[in-house]
Amino acid sequence: MDELLASVDALAAEDLTPLFGPALLERLRPLLVAQNRIAAEIARTVAECDGVGAAEHDGLTTMGSWLRGHGHLSDSEAARVVRAGRALGQLPVMAAAFAAGEVTAEQAAVLGAIAEPRMLALAADQGVDVAAFDELLTGVARTRPYADTTRAVRHYADRLDADGPEPDPTEGRRLSITRHADGSISFRGDLDAVGGERFTTAVEAITQAGRCAADQRTRTQQQADALVQLSDTALATGALPVLRGHKPQVIVTIGIADLVDAATGPGAGRLASGALISAARARWLACDGAVTRVVMGPDGTPLDHGRTLRLVPPHLRRAAEVRDGGCVFAGCSAPTGWCDVHHLLEWANGGETSLANSALLCERHHTKVHHGFRVERDTDGRWHTWRPDGTQIRTGPWTTGPPMSGAA
């Protein structure tokens, strides 16, 4: 093991900057093989630990829980490692290919499904030669992408249990959410075919509807924004389950001095999760939120809890929706349901909560307006958008002068 780690240290010390494309790819290929071979050793060791109950030594009952707690693996990844390890003894062809680095850890776990007790019992009842399928399916994994391996194994399972009970779609669904120190999150999950279709359909609908002129976001950024918008829309409807007597809501705590200060103020606000956000972000949330005044004593004890004030009452929001018809930022066509009511002059700095001081902005453009961009409505009722450098964003084919109609 010391020699292995020393070799990795030597690799890590190499300077990659002189290498160009083909040379980098040639370096990458054996690294991927080595990764597969190490994954095979991990699976083999986990299988042995599983057999002798080694997790009990650390007070745990399963290797899955040990991998999650000690190896910091997600639920789904820990389950894959355990499944691959258990399959090694039943699928010798796959085990050999895995050990040689010809099959990835994910492929090994997928192939491992045919070695689960229920599948082995079905194969025995029907006289199916599992060894033959071990060789056939491993051949697919050696030469084809991961998706093809998955389809081949699913085809085998469907033929083996063509008349079996319809599986519960929730059994294969998993979602693991990890919150990082800065409050951001990473997540990983698995959905069944129907659940996945529902999810991707909803995200794709918002992704396509949220595209606007000169959109520079990548596809992954567009989908991430769509997922946030999906969550925001669900929260805004008020139809989500009540938690401990309150509707689910995003709560931020910030001192009044930071709230009214025009500076960005990093780390001035605190979310319910404990994550810190800037004062600018807190003001962004306050535009179309509710504010509760709480007076704190010198020891941090609340001395007075004032009335919660909804900054934008329902009738004002309806009026803004009728007037603006959606996000007013130049080139954006986000519908009213995706928008916040933005105070043109911030409420914390004395701006009135009135229709004249309001503008509908989607999340992405609301953020931009709180970071230097500006929207303004002229006397003809048309909205115009300016960049932080003072230049106006124009979306039409004209080169001089304002557009004839619509947002500029």
Image: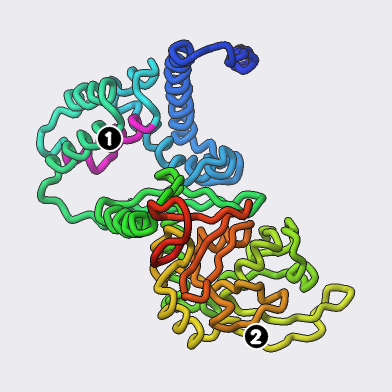
Magenta segment: 106-122
Give how far across and how far down residue 392 sits, in percent. Answer: 54, 56
Residue 153 vs residue 84: left or right? Answer: left
Label 1 secondary element: helix
The residue nearer to you, when weighing 216 against 88, is 216
The answer to which of marks 2 and 1 sits earlier in the sequence is 1
| Cα distance between the residues tagged 2 and 1 | 53 Å
| Residue drawn at x 28%, y 21% as measured from the top left | 142
Residue 132: name its quadrant: top left
Give how far across and how far down residue 82 sits, in percent. Answer: 42, 37
* Mark linked to residue 178: none
Was residue 325 drawn as part of the magenta stretch in this picture? no
Residue 57 vs residue 220: left or right? Answer: right
> Would you call the spot at circle 2 few (<14 residues within 10 Å), some (14-19), or many (20 or more)?
few
* Magenta segment main secondary structure: helix
Q: Is residue 245 visible?
A: no
Q: Is residue 269 above or below residue 207?
A: below
The residue indicated by pointer 2 is: 308
The residue indicated by pointer 1 is: 147
The residue nearer to you, when weighing 24 against 159, is 24
Circles 2 and 1: CB atoms closer than 8 Å: no
| Residue drawn at x 37%, y 55% as measured from the top left | 207
Q: Is residue 314 above or below residue 241?
A: below
Q: Is residue 96 visible?
A: yes
Amino acid found under the numbered disc labelled 2: Thr
| Residue drawn at x 60%, y 74% as measured from the top left | 343
Q: Is residue 5 above or below residue 211?
A: above
